[in-house]
Amino acid sequence: MEKIADILMDSGLDSLRLIPFLFVTYLLMEYLEHKTGEQTTRLIRKAGKLGPVWGGFLGIFPQCGFSAAASSLYAGRLITVGTLLAVYLSTSDEMLPILLSEQVNPVLILKILGMKMLIGIVTGLAADQILVRIFREPEKKADIHSICEHEHCHCENGSITRSAVNHTIRIVVYIFLISLVLNLVIEGIGEENLSGLILNVPVAGQMLAALVGLIPNCAASVVITQLYLEGILNGGAMMSGLLVSAGVGLLILFRLHRNRKKNLQILGLLYLSGVCWGILIQLTGLL
């Protein structure tokens, strides 16, 4: 019981100390979202063949519901599948606020964001060239609207401060619960044994992390980022999970885009891309 109490105390203190950093980060993100959200969506819609380039570039900026907006645009046949994949692969969901709050080396943060952007652009451009015939059929147009408030972050239209507070509270709770479970597991199994289960099995880390990343909830990126910071996941596995972690974008895709077969194909492409890029990153030692 004493060990459990210590773990509860450590997890709580570790989570509480992140509150100021998370709040400031989310406050800035909400301000940018309110100022640039519509312009960003309009820009990517009009990008044409350069859609994957703009999708990969704009995706690295943390904007609430951007992957959801991209899914809506794709369902309305306003962007290509390559542009959609570029957005999914480059968007960072909750990764960036956590890295900033944990005061990770800024060079490493920029490196991760840059890699996600380049991977999104390259994969998106390749997809548009190779899969153009498969994804050519016209679809029934869907209304293009903001899904951020309803589906993802419950943003408040009238107050960026209230929205930032909501974000901060939710993520702190996630971090506390994840840290608590992780600390209990480490206490029971041992950190070296736990990391060995993933790191010592080739490709297993990338495949497992990518499966977690596909969970359509911001908790997925929180889990993956925390596991990386704890040393349980290596850089390649972390990237695999974060590359496919598109938030609720996949939920919106399956809701608005009626062709289930193509939705599953996009899901498979996203997962395969995340795993392959993660393996390549690990083999080359880029992270």
Image (spheres, grey):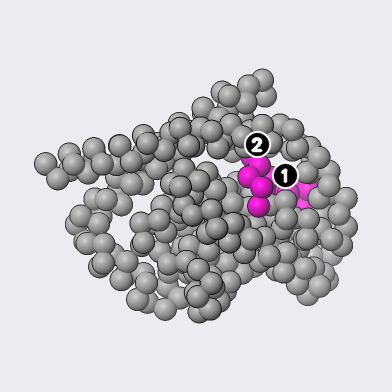
Q: Amino acid at mark 1?
A: Ala
- Label 2 crowd (10 A; few <14 / some 14-19 / many >=20): some
* Side (left or right) of 67 relative to 228: right
Q: Residue 101 location in percent, x, y?
A: 46, 43
- The residue that appears at 62% across and 26% down in the rendered structure is 160
* Side (left or right) of 252 relative to 279: right
Q: Residue 45 location in percent, x, y?
A: 84, 49
Disc ID at residue 148: 2
The residue to which callout 1 is attached is 69
In the rendered structure, does residue 52 fall within the stretch colored magenta?
no
Q: Residue 187 location in percent, x, y?
A: 20, 55
In the rendered structure, does residue 74 fall within the stretch colored magenta?
yes
Q: Amino acid at mark 2?
A: Cys
* Side (left or right) of 119 relative to 48: left
Q: Are marks 1 and 2 in contact (CB under 8 Å)?
A: yes
Q: Quadrant of residue 28?
A: top right
| Disc nearer the start of the sequence (1/2) | 1
- The residue that appears at 84% across and 64% down in the rendered structure is 136
Range drawn in magenta = 60-75
Note whether 53 is above or below 96 in the view shown: below
249 vs 44, nearest the viewer: 44
- The residue that appears at 55% across and 37% down in the rendered structure is 25
163 vs 287, nearest the viewer: 287
Q: Residue 70 location in percent, x, y?
A: 73, 49
Disc ID at residue 97: none
19 vs 278, nearest the viewer: 19
